[in-house]
Image: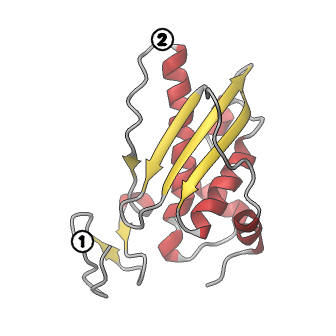
Amino acid sequence: MHYSEKVMEHFRNPKNMGKMRNPDGIGVVGNPICGDMTTMTIKVKNNRIEKIKFTTMGCGAAIAVSSIVTEMAKGKTLDDAMKISYESVIEVIGELPTNELHCSKLGTDALQKAIMDYYAKKEGKKPKDKHVEYIGGRRGRCYCPYCSSETSRASPYCSKCGKPI
């Protein structure tokens, strides 16, 4: 399966990529299967995401999806931005290869964590340390990035193809 033109466009020319000074909210997530890491930062004004940035270390799909999520969230109310799901991202970009579906969850989870961090700060709660929250594959299951077979989170190797994960 090939990437959609939308994915390729956002991979070649990512939108809202970079670091933000003094963000109102920060969300950091990673995936232990493929090693992708995403950090999403937001500035909020009048309960809307006024500015949003991301940094992603990972594959082309992870970068493209993070870019697309920022475009989907920019200007939205916080409540509407929280409703952006990985399924809605897939609807916008078309399909992704099975072994890269987790990329759509990385961007949305980072966005939701950034919004939750904003709310915690607004309520005067001490922000949690910026440790990475790891997410699994789609719907809580993990998949080998090489052969797409379901794997155990605890296993360092795929039981089907034998490659390290």
> Residue 17: x percent and y percent?
69, 50
The quadrant holding residue 114 is top right
- Mark 2 residue element: loop
Rendered residue at 73%/71% (across/down): 8
- Quarter holding the C terminus? bottom left
Rendered residue at 73%/34% (across/down): 51
Inspect this view and state whether residue 117 appears. Answer: yes
- Quarter holding the N terminus? bottom right
User: Mark 1 to mark 2: distance in Å?
Assistant: 41 Å
> Residue 75: x percent and y percent?
78, 35
* Mark 2 surroundings within 10 Å by alpha-carbon count, few (fewer than 14), some (14 through 19), many (20 or more): few
| Image: 64 above or below 25 | below
Rendered residue at 55%/68% (across/down): 59
> Residue 101: x percent and y percent?
52, 67
Q: How has the structure been colored for display?
A: secondary structure
Rendered residue at 25%/77% (across/down): 157
Inspect this view and state whether residue 85 appears. Answer: no
Q: Is residue 105 left or right of residue 128?
A: right
* Mark 1 surroundings within 10 Å by alpha-carbon count, few (fewer than 14), some (14 through 19), many (20 or more): few
Q: Is residue 144 left or right of residue 81?
A: left
**Residue underneath mark 1:** 156
- Check disc 2 and give the amino acid type: Gly
The quadrant holding residue 42 is top right
In the rendered structure, which disc, 1 or 2, sits on the residue that comes first in sequence?
Answer: 2
**Residue underneath mark 2:** 124
- Check disc 1 and give the amino acid type: Pro
Point out the residue furthest to the top here.
124
Q: Is residue 29 left or right of residue 61?
A: left
